[in-house]
Amino acid sequence: MLIILSRSPLTENTDSILEIAREAAEDGEKVAVLHIQDACIGATIDTYCNKLAETKIDIYALKGDCEARGLRRKVKSSVRIIDYKQWVRLVMVEHKNIVSWTT
């Protein structure tokens, strides 16, 4: 399962979708969260990233969006920064289910 977030976890209630992600990861499903747009702010927050990493959820942030927001150097080491080509690979090759949390 690939979850795509576009809003900052500071302003958007992402608890419900992240709980589903944690449960899926605990059940052995390969789970990843991709942060795009303002959600890239989450990739700079220790407690948020640690919570995801503890449950074996892969954490990604879109490079262009991090750079556009001046966050590139603040992204936590547990977050893999990817480009658009790698995003397509996540969607087309690595994950069967895609959840877009981009309202």
Image (cartoon, rainbow, N blue to C red):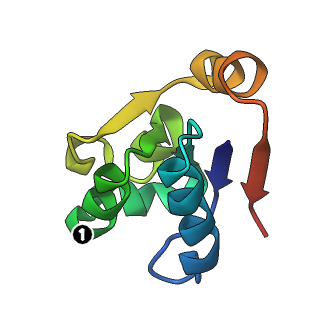
Q: Position of residue 37 (x, y in %)?
A: 59, 54
Which residue is found at the position 76% from the left and 52% from the top? 99
- Taking the image as shown, residue 20 lies to the left or right of residue 97, namely left
Which residue is found at the position 31% from the left and 50% from the top? 53
Q: Which residue is mark 1?
A: 47
Which residue is found at the position 23% from the left and 47% from the top? 76
* Badge count: 1
Q: Is residue 40 visible?
A: yes
Instruction: Depth check: give the residue in front, 43 or 64.
Output: 43
Determine which quarter of the picture holds residue 43: bottom left
Determine which quarter of the picture holds residue 93: top right
Amino acid type, residue under disc 1 in the picture: Thr
Determine which quarter of the picture holds residue 97: top right
Which residue is found at the position 46% from the left and 33% from the top? 63
- Please tell me whether mark 1 sits on a helix, a strand or a loop: helix
Instruction: Depth check: give the residue in front, 36 or 78.
Output: 78
- Taking the image as shown, residue 25 lies to the left or right of residue 48, namely right
Instruction: Depth check: give the residue in front, 84 or 64.
Output: 84
Q: On the rendered image, what quadrant is the C terminus found in? A: bottom right
Q: Position of residue 83 (x, y in %)?
A: 53, 23
Residue 87, compared with residue 99, is above or below; it is: above
- Taking the image as shown, residue 75 lies to the left or right of residue 28, namely left
Q: On the rendered image, what quadrant is the N terminus found in? A: top right
Q: Is residue 35 visible?
A: no
